[in-house]
Each structure stands twice: as C-alpha cells, then as structure tokens.
Image (cartoon, grey):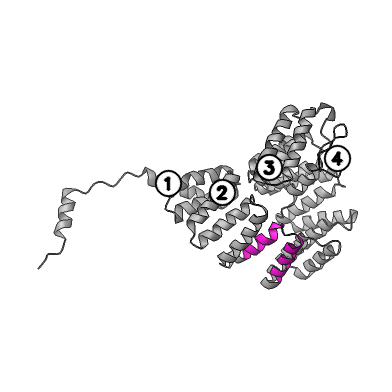
Amino acid sequence: MSRLTLRALFVALALAGIGCGGASAEGGGGTTVQATDNDAIDPEALVAFQAGVRDMAHETRRSRDSARAHFEEALRLSPGLWEARYNLAYLDRQSGNLVAASEGLEAARMAAPESGDVLVALAEVRSALGDSAAAAQLLRSYVGGHPEDLNARVALATLLRAARDYDGALQQARETLVRDPRNARALAEVGRVYRAREDLEVAELVFRKALDLGETAELHNDLGLLELSRGDTQAAFEAFGRAIALDPAFSEAHENQGSVLLHAGDYPGAAAEFRAVLEHDADDVDARVALAICLRGQGEHQAAQREYEAALERAPAHAGALFDYAILRAEFLDQRPQSIELFQRFLTVAPGGLPERAIAERYVREITAEQNAPPPPPPSEETESSEESSEPMDL
C-alpha cells in the first residue's frame, strides 16, 4: 500500500499542537487538536508536548530522540494526553517497530475512541503487520458510524486495494467523490485500482484528471508506476524525475527508480538513487537497507555491513535490516555463528505472513545443529597407517 497515512496524520495532529487555555505549539498552524479532557492537562505536560512537536519538525535522529523523551514526560504528567501516545506511535512506526506502534495506537484509541485519525493510523499499522482483514474491518466499522469522515473512507479504499478487493476499494473511493468531487486522494485511489487491474488507459485518464486539481509529486510517481506497468522504463523515469523536480525530498520516486535499477542488476545506478534519498533523510532506514543490498551486489561486503549496522542503530527492530544483515553474515562474510542472533531478532519482530520467516527458521535450525554437532574424532593409528601406506612410492 502507499505510504499514506501515519506521516500525513502526524502533520494534522502533532504540528497543530493542542489547545489548552488558547496555547498552541510554536510554529504550529491549522486546527487546534483538543486533548481528551483539557481540564485534566497538566500545564507542564503541555509544555513538554509542545517541545516534542518542535523536535519532530526537524526530522533528525537526535531531534526524534528528544521528541520521544518529551512525549514520555508529557504522558507521565498527563496520562490522558492521547496525542502524545499517537506521536510516540509515529516514532515507533518510523523506526520500523510495528508492534510498539500498534500498542501505542491501541492505547491512544482507548483514550480517544472517536478519533478517526487514530483509527486510520492503527489500521495502517495492523495492515503492515500482516493483518489486513482486521485493519479493513476496523475502518469499515468506523466509516459505518462516521460516513462523512472522508479521510477514513479513502484510507479504507487504500487498504482494500492493497488486499486486492478492487470492487470494495472503488466503492469507497466513489462514495468519497460523491461527497467531494474534487478529492484528489480518492481520484488517485480510483486510478490505482485501474492500474492494478491493468486497465492502464483508464488509469492514466484518472491520474491526469487528479493532476488537473493540482500537480503533486505523488501523482507523477503514480504515472511513473503506470509506465512501468506498460514496460516503458524511459517514460517511467521521466515521470519519476518530474516527481523529484516537484519535491526533491519525495523519497518514493528515488526509491522506485532505485528499485527498477536494482532488479535490472544496475547496482551502481540503484545505489545512487538510494543515496539521494539518504541525502535528504539520513534516517530513512528502508533506503539504507536498499543501499546495503546494492553494495553487497557489487561485492562491497564490508561497506554493506556498515550500512546494515547504521540502519539497525537507528531502528533496532527493523525486520528487513535484521534479515538482510543476517544473510550477509551467514553467506558473504563467513560469520554463520554470529548471524543466528540476527535471525532470532528478526523472528521476534517480523509479521507472521512473511515468507522470510521460514528462511530464517531454517537458518536457525541449521546453524544451531552445526554448533551442537560433536567434533569429528581424531584419526586413529590404523587410519594414519592406512593413509601413509597409500602414498605413492618413490621409484
């Protein structure tokens, strides 16, 4: 599914700040977000929350760590401040810790059961954990009681499309467009459904209609993916390039170009794209893992190891980094005993449906058996004598 939601929702919630006696986060704008019970908010908790919001706006590793500390302090002072739980879940999701993100959003949902933003974010994380059916049902139930929440309805369309329920996705997108004919996100979902169905002409018409409402990097990225479906790599790269020109920090276009090059075996070209992502955001763990794969493909195993370690330093629970680094150690660095701990960590955080789980389990069994195997017996005197007698004689 597209990277919808948690970042967009974070902008809506965190950067706006929360209302308490007219206060709002410095630099925030838009609608003020109300806590569950303003009267119960400790003023010092609000100060800590606002400091965390300001830290998150910088998007550096140090600022994110500082934001986490501020939000945790805000919750210690005012446990009902669900917006702080939401933002902590955002940080967990960004670091690849889906389980912690899900738990945080469940806690936020308990504190604010009527928040559509929390429901959408929770559904997105549940889907990422491999439980798409539960995620869709969560949003279906919410949309049934809140039919005018178009953000939730479009998010449901996205989930259904990802689950290949194309009719259901179209129904939700069209219901959104009935209520708001200029909803570009809903139009984009319609286009993505037709692209998934390989009805590329209709998909292009829909994407271009959405572009008429406003040119965005995401829509040009969609057109690039459409051209890839047609097999026109050049047109795809031009579309991705247009997306990057509109928003140089739009990582998906770089990553799509990099992925195409990677699958084509152009490791240097792919590495350049993933490095471009990291230039804008050094903490993009997915791009760092992809760069490590490119380096491994070029035989630069030590450099790949450094990238994996940097990725895991930023996101210790990132399933992809754990698995790929374990493979590097087991198969390319002759470090099979050291790889078992990485495989085990992967198995504790990886979603249940991933095919890589079976591979990791096999490595754990094989390496454990190798470690537990008894050493070979020393050669006996008879064996040594036999070996000596089998040597050729000098004539």
Q: Amino acid at mark 4?
A: Thr
In the rendered structure, which disc, 1 or 4, sits on the residue that comes first in sequence? 4
Q: Is residue 80 visible?
A: no
Q: Nearer the viewer, residue 334 or 62?
A: 62
Q: Amino acid at mark 3?
A: Ser
Q: Residue 241 magenta-drawn?
A: yes
Residue at mark 3 to residue at mark 1: CA–CA distance: 36 Å
> SS at mark 1?
helix
Numbered mark located on residue 310 in the image: 2
Q: Are marks 2 and 3 in contact (CB under 8 Å)?
A: no
Quadrant of residue 24 within the rendered picture: top right
Residue at (70%, 40%) from the top-left corner? 89
Q: Amino acid at mark 1?
A: Pro
In the rendered structure, which disc, 2 or 4, sits on the residue that comes first in sequence? 4
Residue at mark 1 to residue at mark 2: CA–CA distance: 21 Å
Nearer to us: label 1 or label 4: 4
Nearer to us: label 2 or label 4: 2
In the rendered structure, which disc, 1 or 2, sits on the residue that comes first in sequence? 2
> SS at mark 2?
helix
Residue at mark 2 to residue at mark 4: CA–CA distance: 37 Å
Q: Nearer the viewer, residue 138 or 392?
A: 392
> SS at mark 3?
helix
Magenta span dominant secondary structure: helix
Residue at mark 4 to residue at mark 3: CA–CA distance: 23 Å
Numbered mark located on residue 32 in the image: 4
> SS at mark 4?
loop
Q: Which residues are magenta?
A: 235-260
Quadrant of residue 369 within the rendered picture: top left
Q: Which residue is the site of mark 1?
A: 337
Q: Which residue is the site of mark 3?
A: 63
Nearer to us: label 4 or label 3: 3
